[in-house]
Each structure stands twice: as structure tokens, then as C-alpha cells.
């Protein structure tokens, strides 16, 4: 069983450059867990006392918007490490994690993690590389979202069709981009719906305006005098007959 655990650990990106004896020590520390579909691994705001290594299956990383609706930040699968941020900075969990399918994970406590880290300084370098890669992706995401926001402000929605919707494991910001594009698509659809409603209302508005103008005209003294003169002319014609 321990050999199976070691074989799984060797597939993790964090550990690819570490010494062989590292895996023996790590395999003795991790605790395996099985998550059912829709099972919550942890919630946003929870105390972060451990990190998790995904062996198989997939999970979604989620938060909530101002109306408490779920917002999916990312989806990750086998070979990924999650929950390490709270482990390193001692802050509450910045997001929640929910299983998308039956998922196998290995849990490593902060105490065991710090012990191994002190004995294996190579692990610190591997973690730094991983965090730098994530920072690069976040920078790319911010740049793309900024540009898209400017285009939305100009009424330009063409990027919706320009941006591929297919996500890959290498594109860690794919889910966030998809969520943003879905939001913009909703804005665009509501804008088009509003335009259609305005077009339908335009004749009614024009008719109401014409009625208002007509009522204003017939309410003037000029119109009243003109009406009286017309009546006198009709009366004179009747008398002449």
C-alpha cells in the first residue's frame, strides 16, 4: 500500500525533482480520503490546517458573489495540490473546494508539512516555482479581463467569439475567463432585449407624444378663437343658403 502511495506522490508536479528518500517520509505522513460527488472538502473561511493532493477525480474551487451565488474559480484534477495557501500564510481558506465526481485525495497536516519542509529544502524551491507559475497566470488573467472590460465599456462584444471556450489543464485561468465571458454574454443579451423593447415601445411613445402635442394645441386661446371663427363661417353659409 505504501508503494502505491509513493508511486502516486511521484506524479505530483511539486515533487518531481525531489530525492528518493523524500517519498518514503512523505508516504508515512499523508492520510488518504475519498470524496463523493458534491461533497465539500472545505469551505471558504475555514481554518487551514492541511493541504490536499489529488490522486484521481476532479474538484471545483468556488467562492460566492454578493448574492451568495456560487462562482467557480477553477477546476483541478489529478496531480494538483490544493489548500496550500492557508497552510503557508496561516490565514483562513480563501475559497471552498467541492468534488465534481468521486475523488481520491491525500491530506498532509501543517505540522507534518513543516517538518518535511525543514528536512527537504528542495521542496521549498519547488513550491516557489509553483507559486510563480500561478502568479504569471493571474497576471495574464488580469490583463485579459482589463482589456475585455474596456471593450465592453465601448459596446464591443466581439471578443466573446474570439475567445476559445475549451479549457485545458495548462490554462489555469480558463474557468475564470469562461465565467467572465458568460457574464458579459448575459449583459449583451439583456442589452439586445432592452433594444427590442425600446423599438416596440417607440410607436407607442410617438403616438402618446402626438396626442400630447394635439391636446396642447387645442387647449390654446388661438385654437379656441380659430374654432369660433370656423363656427361663424359655417353659420353664415347656412344662412346664405
Image (spheres, helix red, strand yellow):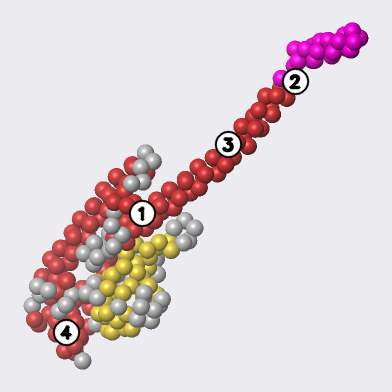
Q: Decide which of 90, 224 is in the foreground and name it.
A: 224
Q: Which residue is mark 2?
A: 218
Measuring 18% from the left and 75% from the top, which residue is drawn there? 12
Q: Which residue is mark 3?
A: 202
Residues at badges 1 and 3 in contact (C-beta under 8 Å)?
A: no
> Is residue 233 on the magenta stretch?
yes
Spatial distance from mark 1 to mark 4, Cα to Cα?
41 Å
Percent of width and height locating residue 115: 19, 76
Q: Which numbered disc, 3 or 4, marks the residue that appears first in the sequence?
A: 4
Residue 181 tag number: 1
Q: Is residue 14 above or below residue 69?
A: below
Q: Residue 91: which quarter of the image? A: bottom left
Q: Which one is in front in this view, the residue at disc 1 or the one at disc 4?
A: 1
Q: Which residue is mark 4?
A: 6
Residues at badges 3 and 2 in contact (C-beta under 8 Å)?
A: no
Q: Main secondary structure of the magenta part?
A: helix
**Secondary structure found at label 4:** helix
**Secondary structure found at label 3:** helix
Which quarter of the rendering shows the C terminus? top right
Amino acid at each position: 500500500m505504501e508503494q502505491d502511495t509513493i508511486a502516486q506522490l511521484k506524479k505530483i508536479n511539486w515533487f518531481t525533482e525531489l530525492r528518493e528518500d523524500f517519498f518514503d517520509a512523505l508516504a508515512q505522513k499523508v492520510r488518504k480520503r475519498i470524496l463523493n460527488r458534491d461533497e465539500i472538502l472545505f469551505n471558504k473561511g475555514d481554518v487551514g490546517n492541511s493541504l490536499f493532493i489529488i490522486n484521481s477525480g476532479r474538484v471545483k474551487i468556488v467562492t460566492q458573489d454578493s448574492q451568495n451565488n456560487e462562482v467557480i474559480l477553477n477546476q483541478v484534477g489529478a496531480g494538483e495540490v490544493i489548500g496550500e495557501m492557508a497552510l503557508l500564510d496561516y490565514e483562513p481558506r480563501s475559497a471552498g473546494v467541492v468534488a465534481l465526481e468521486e475523488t481520491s485525495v491525500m491530506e498532509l497536516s501543517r505540522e507534518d508539512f513543516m517538518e518535511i519542509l525543514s528536512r527537504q529544502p528542495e521542496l521549498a524551491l519547488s513550491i516557489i516555482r509553483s507559486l510563480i507559475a500561478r502568479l504569471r497566470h493571474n497576471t495574464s488573467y488580469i490583463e485579459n479581463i482589463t482589456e475585455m472590460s474596456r471593450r465592453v465599456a465601448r459596446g464591443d462584444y466581439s471578443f466573446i467569439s474570439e475567445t476559445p471556450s475549451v479549457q485545458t489543464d495548462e490554462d489555469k485561468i480558463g474557468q475564470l475567463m469562461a465565467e467572465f465571458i458568460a457574464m458579459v454574454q448575459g449583459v449583451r443579451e439583456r442589452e439586445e432585449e432592452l433594444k427590442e423593447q425600446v423599438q416596440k415601445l417607440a410607436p407607442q411613445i410617438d403616438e402618446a407624444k402626438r396626442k400630447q402635442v394635439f391636446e396642447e394645441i387645442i387647449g390654446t386661446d388661438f385654437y379656441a378663437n380659430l374654432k369660433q371663427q370656423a363656427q361663424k363661417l359655417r353659420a353664415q353659409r347656412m344662412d346664405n343658403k
